[in-house]
Amino acid sequence: MSTFNVPKREEVTRNNQDIFDNLEKAVGFVPNLFATYAHSENALANYLNLSNAKTSLKTKEKEVVNLAVSEVNNCVYCLSAHTAISKMNGFTDEQILELRAGHASFDAKLDALAKLAKNITENRGATDTAVLENFFEAGWTKENLIDTIVLVGDKTISNYINNTTEVPVDFPVAQPLETVIA
């Protein structure tokens, strides 16, 4: 594959430059993956609108889904970014590893969410009935289910863009799960 460049601010459209400026203010930098979206006139804004849309899931719950999905999709970039974000949201290193593996021994409700996110991703939406029943028995609602599926789609988009473009990771790199759990 040819090298896929990460566009600089001056290489993107005016609309994307404005988004870069907002990201710079909010995050302190423009993550390489977001910059890569800016190869398209509309993809970055569309993705950020989806990613920042209202949801019934709290921030920590979203990170549970992001980690489980990114692990299944083998996206080092997203695993690295969401490991850093998960730490900022109070998860420990050990908890993050469990979430990446698709479970959470430390919290029954998050365990059901992690298992659901992993199962949806692995089975391309043909969710196992027992996993779904466990999700509802843990106290989640139909609204939470739909919002989780939307988040699985959101994260899968980023996973696929990174796995296709192979842009450099600009977060501390998450190690392969089997090397850190072994």
Image (cartoon, rainbow, N blue to C red):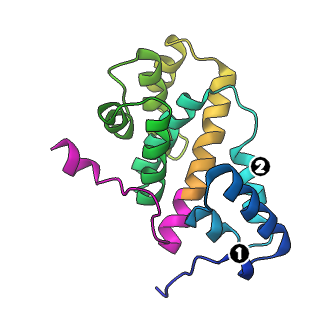
Between tags 2 and 1, which lies in front? 1
Q: Indicate which disc, 2 or 1, sits on the residue closer to the N terminus.
A: 1
Give above or below for 170 relative to 108: below
Residue at x-position 63% and y-position 48%: 154
Residue at x-position 56% and y-position 81%: 5
Q: Amino acid at mark 1?
A: Arg
Alpha-carbon span between mark 2 and mark 1: 20 Å
Q: Is residue 20 magenta?
A: no
The residue lying furthest to the left in this view is 182
Question: Which region shows up in magenta?
Answer: 159-182
Pointer 1 local density, CA inside 10 Å: few below 14, some 14–19, many at least 20: some
Give above or below for 22 relative to 98: below
Disc 1 target residue: 9
The residue lying furthest to the bottom in this view is 2
Give above or below for 83 relative to 167: above
Disc 2 target residue: 49
Q: Percent x, y for residue 2?
A: 49, 88
Is residue 119 shown to the viewer in this render?
no
